[in-house]
Image (cartoon, rainbow, N blue to C red):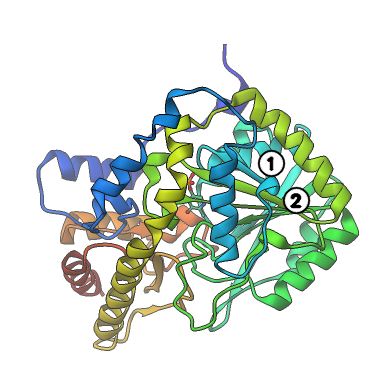
Amino acid sequence: MFADRTNWNLQANPLSEALAQHRAAGKPLLDLTASNPTECGFDYDSRAILQSLANPASLAYDPDPRGLPGARQAVAAYYAARGVSVTADSVILTTGTSEAYSFVFRTLCNPGDEILIPEPSYPLFAFLADIQDVKLVRYPLDYDYGWQINFHALRQSITSRTRGVIVVHPNNPTGNFTKPHELEKLNEICAARNLAIIADEVFLDFTLQDQAPFSFARNPASLTFTMSGLSKISGVPQMKAAWLITSGPEQLQAQALARLEVSADTYLSMNAPVQWAIPALLEQRRPFQTQLLARVRKNLAGLDRELATQKSCARLVVEGGWYAVLRVPATRSDEELAVELLTQKNVYVHPGHFYDFPSEGFLIVSLITHESEFAAGVKLLLSMF
Ligand SMILES: Cc1ncc(COP(=O)(O)O)c(C=O)c1O
């Protein structure tokens, strides 16, 4: 009765099974995978957030397929504050970046067409692609004292069915930003072959470097779809407020926007209260990001202090984002190791293979975990080796 695209393996993997048993047994747990900011003990201005949802204007239904103009202007102002000039007309509001990906895949791809994605990266892409009948083809990021796009492999991955290249800027979980020289090469490749760039910038604001990273939002050289949203920027994933910005050569940009607008108009999925709240919710980013970045820095410093006391494990360079990648002895599979850490040490981490790391020996820890839990978890984790 069901479509092939939904033939997913829905069996729990050994780590989720072990986690469910661990929780059911009521055992203590040091969770180093925390990624839900609303559960990490950050101080939110609850009054301002709740008040933002009580705008009397929400009582009227006056939909705009791209989203309410005031909300789109607030998004444009967010970019203006980073020195990037984005017009409100090029912004389409979406309920989460997943919807933005769906609109883009549907606009670019016929069934079976291909989109290139970085490896390692974020595991949700596989499902998003299945649902849209898109085939994902991976291009490697190589690590050598920092991550970089392997352009030779990327070029070789392109076929007559390739429609676009996804970049995650900075990437989850490797934390590397796309560099200006990489942007130049991407533009060269994409413009020459009529491919689009799809830039996921949900972690753009969370840089650990002195220099602010560039944004793809005004990239003029190839058709570019840039997405971001309030889940990470202001730490409010429950609001389901995100956006998609289209840039590139003028004609292509106009054609893409006109097509995207039909998709957006068909669903009109953003609700009015959240759209009216977007300017105020964007304001919340300032206190949220200050707290989050302080925690990331503190956890990273704590991690480095612990790593300095031993020789078996190391961490890879982190330029931004919410995660750190640990290089650990590959004496068993990463998944077996994660299960052992859970059952023997009460520490929950993600194995590298969840993110398609090309080999064993990588664990991912979340740097937004509460400091005391993080410090205790890291100590126990390292005591395994
Ligand atoms: C790279 C990346 N993109 C998108 C998302 C999801 O964002 P949203 O809540 O806006 O759908 C995540 C969530 O972790 C992510 O890591």
Label drawn at residue 310? none
Left or right, 125 with reference to 56: right
Percent across and percent down for residue 218 are: 71, 61
In percent of the image, x 58 and y 73: which residue is there? 213
Up-down relation of residue 129 to residue 197 (above or below):
above
Percent across and percent down for residue 247 are: 75, 54
Q: Most extreme residue toward the front, as rendered?
A: 56
In this view of the protein, which residue sits in the foreground, 321 or 326?
321
Up-down relation of residue 200 to residue 20 (above or below):
below
Disc 1: which residue:
104
Query: How busy is the neighbourhood of tag 2: few (under 14 within 10 Å), some, or many (20 plus)?
Result: many
Percent across and percent down for residue 301 are: 29, 81
Label drawn at residue 164? 2
Left or right, 165 with reference to 206: right
Dot 1 falls on a residue whose secondary structure is helix
Q: Total number of numbered labels?
A: 2
In this view of the protein, which residue sits in the foreground, 258 or 86?
86
Specify which label sits upstream in the sequence, 2 or 1: 1
In this view of the protein, which residue sits in the foreground, 337 or 319?
319
| Residues tagged 2 and 1 counted as in contact (Cβ below 8 A) | yes
In percent of the image, x 50 and y 41: which residue is there? 96
Amino acid type shown at disc 1: Val
Amino acid type shown at disc 2: Gly
